Image (spheres, rainbow, N blue to C red):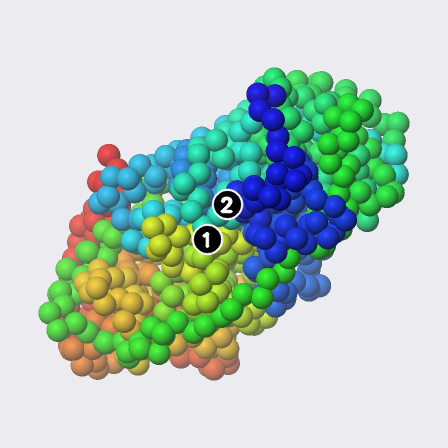
Amino acid sequence: MSYTEPTAGEIKEQRIYRTFGVTDEEFARVTELLGRLPNYVEIGVFSVMWSEHCSYKSSRRVLRRFPTSGPQVLQGPGENAGIVDIGDGQAVVFKIESHNHPTAIEPYQGAATGVGGIIRDIFTMGARPVALLNSLRFGPLDDAHNRYLFSHSVAGIGGYGNCIGIPTVGGEVYFDDSYTHNPLVNAMCVGIIEQAKIARGSASGVGNPVLVVGAKTGRDGIHGATFASAQDPHAKERSAVQVGDPFMEKLLLEACLELIETGKVVGIQDMGAAGLTSSSAEMASRAGSGLTLDVSRVPCRETGMSPYEIMLSESQERMLVVMQKGEEAIAFSIFEKWGLEATVIGQVTDDGMLRIVEGGKVAGEMPVTALVDEAPVLERPSAVPAYLSQLLPAPTSLPDGPSHEDALMHLLAKPTIASKEWVYDQYDSMVRTETFVRPGSDAAIVGVPGTNKALGMVTDGNGRYVYLDPYAGGAWAVAEAARNLVCSGARPLAVTDCLNYGNPEKPEIFYQFERSADGISEACLTFGTPVISGNVSLYNESLGQDIYPTPVIGMIGLMDDAGMITPSSFTNPGHILYVLGDIAAPLQDGLGGSEYLAEFLPEGVLAYKLPHLDLGTEKAVQDACYQLIQQGVVNAAHDVSDGGLLVALAESAIQGNIGVRVEVPQEVRDEALAALLFGESPSRIVIEVASDRSADVERVAQQLGIPCARLGVVTDELRFSVMANGSKVVDMAIGDLRSAWQGAIASWMN
């Protein structure tokens, strides 16, 4: 070692613990739990286990509000990933996590290791990963640094996923000033497993050996967990960002799945945030056991690593495995076959202690319950932000607003709305040949091997909505995710969430967090989609500016028959277009929260109320769409969301390379027409049906008590034509719309 670690007395007297993010009160509590002062290794271990990232100390009491159970749930929160029954003895395993702070510092590796970490969470459960999704948010592309962060993050996601051979099938990308210095990179992974082969992260069985498998341990990522919990993460060094190796992870994936298949694994866990510390403490906590670990046995790629460094390293592509006693040779053989190391570093004990030794010397000794169960649960103050009481009723037009044609062209060219081909063309979305619907539709669809079933999967969220109405914005994210699945023909099953917020020490930020959690909870109950896994990312602020409160919902849906897959692109000339839901809702709701206001009144977009969301109406609209798809009535379906009705119609026409002729089915004051065409009121779906199925649409809508409006027809003339009040308000070539929509992001990035 090239330095001398401070003594326990020096740690207290010089308050060195503060540099680890440990408060004076927490240090006093650690001392009380140990019955003595902690040494350098021990305070390092406590600092990461009690960090926001690992302990959820600000969010834990709020997360308890989520519904987490249901007849379909096989594993809820508390394990590496959640698991849901999909019938026939099979299950889907999925989770989403953030890698925001590392990406802000080193975008390629920050994003890449986020992908690697979430993949390990899935195969740790014994599941084979079959799909990746992501949710990305960056500042506007007219800023060079934003373009740098965006391009390198996308490259990191693609580089890792493509190399390991897991298709990236879907996601979302938003651009807003709120994320300029603090991008959000949320990665989701989905796997499939036979229910009889589910593995869990438990360290049980006194005397069972503990193995570290995979890559060697280095000094990269030390204190990454506390770094991600810091108020000023940008002040940290790049050494806190891990470096990934997707080729090694591919070997690790196959070796771990083969090892689990032997039935000799007692427990297995990814070494993610806080590395060996969190994996060992959490595994012991689940089993009510203890562990003794000899760090001198841990394979290291750098010389002279101290117990402190080994315990806190977040080097990638490593797992902790507890084997049945006497079966270690099986692990050695399998990992040698895959060119990887498997090393016994300790054993399970019955004394409830996490004991760290270096050879014959004890380097640290802590009760597992103190590390996990006694982690602080904070009662953060909450205060309603003053701006919420000052929001105005949203306008239905702008005094000097653009023509409807100009508005449509501008909105289609906004990077948030425009085609994301520049992004997903860098991802391999077809590897493994089970991807039925690639990125670009309402939801991705992946087949379940050996069956006629398929899984729908999506990520959704809108930080601006949550800022304007935390409760409704949280519910809205769930509603839109479910709506996207339903439009694709899938029945929503369950949710994983990634909750991205600013500094929770600010009462107004904590209010946004807890109220949006309430909205998520209510919506999950409405749609029958329990929260089975997730992640919280706080302290997303830079230069004193917090990001929008941005809960991201990852949702999985099931299709019993993959033949019912429904595209978002229009398909056949002569078919009829309908809107399920209240087409005129924006005449009451106005343009609040919309991309229209963000584009043409950017300084005022945060001044107006969000449109009203009624979860009962939303559920009825989704039920109508799902029933009509199951009855074979619907040829295409697309939800009305960012950009409003005209953008939804244009997207479906562009993707189908087909024309549409629309006539607004009611008289609308000219000054309110912008709201009807571009307002973002929820609970509306555009569907395409054959002309002889119109009666079916109207019958189902009537049965479920929802409005339903005939809107127009699909044509073979490649034009986008809209009539209102007897006059043509939009008449444009599909090719011109495509040019604006398809090339927008590429024009900034190339």
Which secondary structure, mark 2?
Answer: loop
The image shows residue 643 at horizontal and vertical percentages of 29, 62
Q: Nearer the viewer, residue 445 or 211?
A: 211
- Circle 2 Cα neighbour tier, 10 Å, few/some/many (<14 / 14–19 / ≥20): many
Image quadrant in which the C terminus is located: top left
Q: Do tag 2 and tag 1 residues touch (Cβ < 8 Å)?
A: yes
Q: Nearer the viewer, residue 161 or 368?
A: 368
Residue, far left: 400
Three-letter code for the amino acid on which mark 2 is drawn = Ala
Three-letter code for the amino acid on which mark 1 is drawn = Tyr
- Drawn side of residue 697 relative to residue 712, left or right: right
The image shows residue 621, relative to residue 739, as above or below, that is below
Name the quadrant containing residue 326. top right
Q: Say which mark, if any, is on residue 250.
A: none
Q: Nearer the viewer, residue 97 or 1?
A: 1
C-alpha distance separating marks 2 and 1: 8 Å
Name the quadrant containing residue 646. bottom left
- Drawn side of residue 261 relative to residue 326, left or right: left
- Drawn side of residue 386 relative to residue 370, left or right: left
Q: Say which mark, if any, is on residue 228.
A: 2
Which circle's residue, 2 or 1, is located before the other in the chain? 2
Q: Say which mark, if any, is on residue 539.
A: 1
Name the quadrant containing residue 250. top right
- Circle 1 Cα neighbour tier, 10 Å, few/some/many (<14 / 14–19 / ≥20): many
The image shows residue 540, relative to residue 106, as above or below, that is below
**Residue at the (81%, 49%) spot, across then down:** 288
**Residue at the (51%, 39%) spot, across then down:** 114
The image shows residue 640 at horizontal and vertical percentages of 36, 65
The image shows residue 153, relative to residue 95, as above or below, that is above
The image shows residue 734 at horizontal and vertical percentages of 21, 52
